[in-house]
Amino acid sequence: MGQMIWLLCPVCGNKTRLKVRPDTELVNFPLYCPKCKQETLVNVKKGNLSVVCLSSLISK
């Protein structure tokens, strides 16, 4: 089994509650940070996290 890596919050940089393997792919995943209480839409591919949309930009 490969190494597991923590997903870090793109807003505050702290650990979230999720670990992913290097072969995991997430598309338009709502990543929630328990510390800054922000939800961010992200893509994860080959362990690299890219931000799709910040929660402050999402209109409700």
Image (cartoon, rainbow, N blue to C red):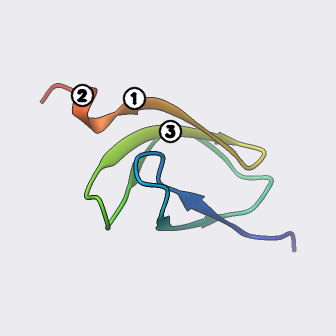
The reply to whether dot 1 and dot 2 touch (C-beta < 8 Å) is yes
The reply to whether dot 2 and dot 3 touch (C-beta < 8 Å) is no
Task: Give the percent coordinates (x, y) of residue 53.
Answer: 39, 29
- Residue drawn at x 35%, y 34% is 54
Task: Give the percent coordinates (x, y) of residue 55.
Answer: 28, 37
Mark drawn on residue 42: 3
Rounded to the nearest angstrom, the CA distance separating label 1 from label 2 is 7 Å
Amino acid carrying mark 2 in the image: Ile
- Residue drawn at x 82%, y 70% is 3
- Label 1 crowding class (10 Å Cα cut-off): few <14, some 14-19, many 20+? some
Report the residue marked by disc 2: 58
Element under label 2? loop
Amino acid carrying mark 3 in the image: Val
Q: Is residue 33 above or below residue 17?
A: above
- Residue drawn at x 79%, y 56% is 22
Element under label 1? strand
Residue that sits furthest to the left in the current view: 60
Q: Is residue 47 above or below residue 14?
A: above
Residue that sits furthest to the bottom in the current view: 1
Amino acid carrying mark 1 in the image: Cys
Tell whether 50 sits left or right of 34.
right
Quarter of the image for residue 1 reads bottom right
Mark drawn on residue 53: 1
